[in-house]
Image: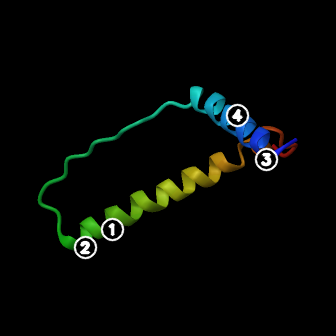
């Protein structure tokens, strides 16, 4: 398979994968928070994003796991 064919195949797979994805947006309105509270929330959301990405990166192995 040539490099161009590999790229074309990869783009096709990406397009198919994105058809199944659902974009989600969360809006949160917070008032009267201290600087440390805001920093804590920023870090919490960042780590939640990392954890979510960690989970979905290995989703095939999680579905096929023999562990209960």
Q: How many marks?
A: 4
Task: Tell me the distance, in whole angstroms, between the alpha carbons under discs 4 and 3.
Answer: 15 Å
Locate residue 23, reporting x and y percent. Answer: 45, 34
| Element at label 2 | helix
- Residue 28 occupies quadrant: top left
Residue depicted at 84% across the width and 44% down the height: 2
CB of mark 2 within 8 Å of CB of mark 4?
no
Q: Nearer the viewer, mark 4 or mark 1?
A: 4
Residue depicted at 34% across the width and 41% down the height: 26
Task: Tell me the distance, in whole angstroms, between the alpha carbons under discs 2 and 1.
Answer: 6 Å
45 vs 19, nearest the viewer:
19
Residue depicted at 48% across the width and 61% down the height: 47
Task: Tell me the distance, in whole angstroms, between the alpha carbons under discs 2 and 3.
Answer: 50 Å
Q: Which mark is residue 13?
A: 4
Task: Tell me the distance, in whole angstroms, between the alpha carbons under discs 4 and 1.
Answer: 38 Å
CB of mark 2 within 8 Å of CB of mark 3?
no
The mark that comes first in sequence, 4 or 3, is 3
Locate residue 53, reporting x and y percent. Answer: 58, 52
Q: Which residue is mark 3?
A: 3
The mark that comes first in sequence, 3 or 1, is 3
Q: In which quadrant is the N terminus drawn?
A: top right
Q: Which mark is residue 14?
A: none
Q: In which quadrant is the C terminus drawn?
A: top right
Q: Nearer the viewer, mark 2 or mark 4?
A: 4
Q: Which residue is mark 1?
A: 40
- Left or right: residue 30 versus residue 13 is left
Q: Which mark is residue 36?
A: 2
Residue depicted at 53% across the width and 58% down the height: 50
Locate residue 51, reporting x and y percent. Answer: 56, 56
């Amino acid at each position: 398979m040539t490099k161009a064919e590999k790229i074309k195949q990869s783009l096709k797979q990406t397009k198919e994968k994105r058809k199944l994805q659902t974009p989600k947006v969360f809006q949160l309105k917070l008032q009267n928070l201290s600087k440390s509270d805001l920093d804590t929330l920023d870090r919490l959301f960042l780590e939640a994003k990392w954890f979510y990405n960690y989970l979905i990166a290995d989703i095939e192995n999680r579905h096929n796991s023999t562990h209960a």
